[in-house]
């Protein structure tokens, strides 16, 4: 896909999601992930963090789980998605994992709960991001709601391939932006 294939204004979030899914289908995430993880491992803000939230990836997301075997001196946590309605919860990522009814891995329900206020850095997935920090999620709003419960001092990082970073995405008042983007090319601050 080229930049000209991107939706144009006034494209909806659904238009952008369709574009992002098509673009993602042509990417080799196994090739992209090691570079993105390497940039994150060397990034000073991550090296100083005491508690880092990572996501357990779907097949079309950069896998950050190997960061757990890095030399980062921190506690890793991840989210649990409710079975039906409700909010994401954060849990320690030391014990066994379980499969959510929708097929993705998450911390086991018995894993200790972590207060969102204890998280220093949140590494967040998204279908696409823009240079202003707008995150295009899958549409359920789980991560936007979670971000509303984290302190302003927490560092938020959108993680995705460079091909999915665009100039501007549509946003709504409830959308929470990220402060940094991590791709296979490096970690940059958003506008």
Image (tube, helix red, strand yellow):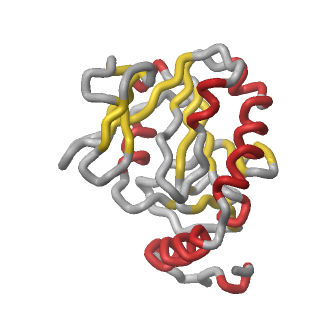
Residue 164 visible here: yes
Q: Nearer the viewer, residue 178 or 185?
A: 185
The structure residue drawn at horizontal position 77% and vertical position 25%, both measured from the top left corner, is 44
Left-right relation of 145 to 45? left
Seen in the picture, residue 172 relative to 56 is either above or below; the reply is: below
Classify 45 as above or below 137: above
The residue at 73%/60% (across/down) is: 162
Point out residue 38 in the picture as x, y percentages from the top left corner. 77, 37
Number of marks present in the image shown: 0
Residue lying at 32% horizontally and 21% vertically, measured from the top left: 111
Closer-to-camera residue (136/61)? 61
The N terminus, quarter of image: bottom right
Q: Nearer the viewer, residue 188 or 58?
A: 58
Q: Position of residue 123 (x, y in %)?
A: 57, 38
Task: Examine the rendering and report whether any part of residue 153 can be seen.
Answer: no
Q: Which residue is most to the left? A: 84
Q: Position of residue 93 (x, y in %)?
A: 44, 24
**In the displayed structure, would residue 80 be above or below residue 186?**
above
Q: Quadrant of residue 83?
A: top left
Residue at 50% across, 47% down: 57
Left or right: 96 in relation to 170: left
């Amino acid at each position: 896909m080229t930049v000209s294939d991107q939706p144009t204004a006034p494209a909806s979030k659904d238009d952008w999601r369709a574009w992002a899914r098509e673009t993602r289908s042509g990417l080799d995430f196994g090739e992209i992930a090691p570079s993105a993880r390497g940039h994150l491992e060397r990034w000073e803000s991550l090296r100083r963090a005491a508690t880092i939230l990572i996501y357990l990836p779907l097949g079309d997301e950069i896998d950050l789980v190997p960061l757990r075997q890095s030399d980062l001196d921190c506690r890793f946590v991840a989210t649990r998605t409710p079975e039906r309605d409700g909010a994401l919860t954060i849990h320690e990522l030391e014990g066994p994992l379980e499969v959510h009814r929708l097929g993705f891995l998450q911390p086991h329900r018995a894993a200790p709960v972590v207060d969102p206020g204890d998280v220093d850095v949140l590494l967040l997935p998204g279908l696409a991001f823009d240079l202003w920090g707008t995150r295009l999620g899958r549409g359920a709003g789980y991560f936007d709601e979670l971000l509303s419960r984290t302190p302003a001092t927490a560092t938020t990082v959108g993680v995705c391939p460079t091909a999915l970073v665009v100039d501007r995405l549509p946003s709504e008042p409830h959308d929470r932006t990220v402060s940094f983007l991590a791709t296979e090319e490096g970690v940059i601050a958003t506008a």
